[in-house]
């Protein structure tokens, strides 16, 4: 069975005015869809086509002749994870178990915010900033292009897309403003908490 574009967890205009429906029309409707379409074309007739998306990612990550499969499969996964890392009315301070763990592992929420902003701002070119669980401890990481935590034995809790297509229509070249808006207005701490619980 072919891979399919998962439904967005909210309407295309639900993140406005921070991220516009115009951005989601392109980013979800065109870019994310294109990764799904390309992946299905690349896997046509391959035994990998019958595996889960996660297995396709992990198997192609180990084989440099499958870079095209890895890039498209990982981008399908990354974007689905990114849509869920945001919600209308999100943003602000973390709550509950994840808030306690952030304080324990980073020292303070402010320190986490500083590290996450720095990861997003300093990812040269295209890539992703992440909150991950790495050997039981929270960490902020960044990955280039389609690369993702599961290829490094880490569990993703949250992600922010810093490819230009994620913010250029709304913020032009102001990546730091997009990052600040992601944290202040959009980040979905319930999703991060759910991922932390599932990892324990
Ligand atoms: Mn993207």
Image (cartoon, rainbow, N blue to C red):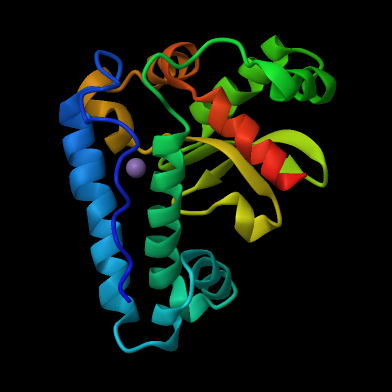
Q: Position of residue 25 (x, y in %)?
A: 17, 37
Of residues 62 and 137, the one nearer the viewer is 137
Q: Quadrant of residue 59?
A: bottom right
Q: Is residue 132 visible?
A: no
Give left or right: position of 73 versus 17. right
- Residue drawn at x 70%, y 38% is 197
In this rendering, the count of numbered labels is: 0
**Vertical side of 73 occupied by 108: above or below:** above
Residue 142 lies, in percent from the top left, at 58, 39
**Residue drawn at the location 30% of the way across and 22% of the way down:** 173
Q: In the figure, 161 relative to 107: above or below?
A: below
| Quadrant where the image shows the C terminus | top right
Q: Residue at x 84, y 21 (%)?
A: 104
Quadrant of the drawing holding the N terminus: bottom left
Q: Residue drawn 25% across and 28% down?
A: 168
Point out the quarter of the image occupied by ligand 1.
Answer: top left
Q: Viewed as shown, does residue 58 lie left or right of 21?
A: right
Residue 49 to residue 149: above or below: below
What x and y, as percent, mark residue 92? 54, 10
- Visible residue check, residue 17: yes
Q: Nearer the viewer, residue 92 or 121?
A: 92
């Amino acid at each position: 069975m072919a891979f399919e574009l998962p439904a967005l967890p909210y309407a295309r205009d639900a993140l406005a005015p921070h991220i516009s429906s115009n951005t989601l029309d392109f980013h979800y409707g065109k870019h994310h869809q294109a990764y799904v379409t390309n992946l299905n074309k690349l896997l046509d007739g391959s035994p990998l086509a019958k595996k889960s998306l996660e297995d396709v990612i992990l198997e192609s990550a180990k084989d440099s002749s499958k870079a095209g499969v890895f890039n498209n499969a990982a981008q399908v996964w990354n974007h689905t994870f990114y849509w869920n890392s945001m919600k209308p009315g999100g943003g602000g301070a973390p709550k509950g178990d994840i808030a306690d763990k952030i304080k324990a592992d980073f020292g303070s929420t402010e320190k986490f915010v500083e590290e996450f902003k720095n990861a997003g701002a300093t990812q040269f070119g295209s890539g992703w900033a992440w909150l991950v669980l790495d050997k039981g401890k929270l960490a902020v990481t960044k990955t280039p292009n389609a690369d993702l935590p599961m290829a490094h034995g880490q569990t993703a809790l949250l992600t922010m897309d810093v490819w230009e297509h994620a913010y250029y229509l709304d913020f032009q070249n102001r990546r730091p403003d997009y990052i600040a808006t992601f944290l202040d207005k959009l980040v979905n701490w319930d999703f991060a908490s759910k991922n932390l619980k599932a990892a324990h």
